[in-house]
Image: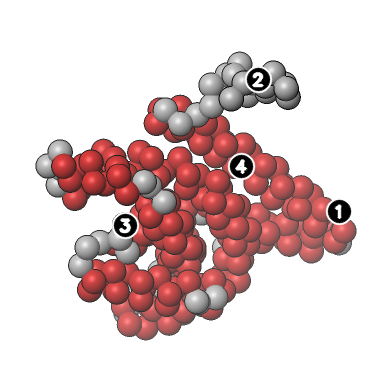
Amino acid sequence: MLLLSGLLAGAAAFAAGIARTHRRWIVRFLAGLCTEVFRGTSALVMIFWVFFVLPLALGRQLVPMWAGTLALGLTYGPYGAEIVRGALGAVDPAQREGGIALGFTPWQRMRLILLPQAVPEMIPPFSNLLVELLKGTALVSVMGMGDLAFSGNLVRLALQESAEIHLYVLLLYFAIAFLLTRSMRGLERRLKAGAGTAPRKGTAAVRVPEGSGAA
């Protein structure tokens, strides 16, 4: 569930975030409208809507796995869209102007110039968003889906040990979140090294003593 909803949220984030930097105002307006609508919707309400209301329009019931994936992806994707938009906007305008001077198309400027510099800066906020998505997966238990929280509740009812089971579930969520953040930090270092923005190992700032006469 976390992997599938994360992939959907990431795809929605990049699609809407890039669209919000489009040169045509109608594209920016539609992307911004969709972002605000889904960002302002409760994840729990979205799960109920996708699982119970959407099948009435489609004429068929969605599998809980796909319903939860769709609901969480559409809920957390717009938050990622603002991360993408902000990172792209933070790239030095001279880089964009250089791509125009070289005759690059808008897509070439995005793929070859803007994204390689912006993506490493997206990783820390995306890491936080991924942890929030992990905690949001507990909401799919309302559909009877066997996620970590739902399984922990079943064990609690069977063993009649609430405190211990909830502690174990809490520790499992913490362990998964810790692994996710460490993995994202490693990805950030690798991307920055590929973009040439990572600090070099073994380098340190040289402090000039006062009164040495250095300008």
Q: State which mark lies toward you, 3 or 2.
A: 2
Whole-number angstrom distance, CA of label 3 to CA of label 1:
46 Å
Q: Which of 57 and 182 is in front in this view?
A: 182
Residue 150 pos. (x, y %): 66, 61
Q: State which mark lies toward you, 3 or 4.
A: 3
Which residue does the numbered mark 2 point to in the structure image? 213
Which residue does the numbered mark 1 point to in the structure image? 164
* Residue 121 vertical position relative to residue 15 in the rendered view, above or below: above
Which residue does the numbered mark 4 point to in the structure image? 181
* Residue 200 vertical position relative to residue 71 in the rendered view, above or below: above
Crowding near the residue tagged with mark 3, few <14, some 14–19, many ≥20 C-alpha atoms within 10 Å: many
Which quadrant holds the C terminus? top right
Whole-number angstrom distance, CA of label 3 to CA of label 2:
51 Å
Whole-number angstrom distance, CA of label 4 to CA of label 1:
26 Å
Q: Nearer the viewer, residue 153 or 180?
A: 180
User: Is label 1 in a helix, a strand or a loop?
Assistant: helix
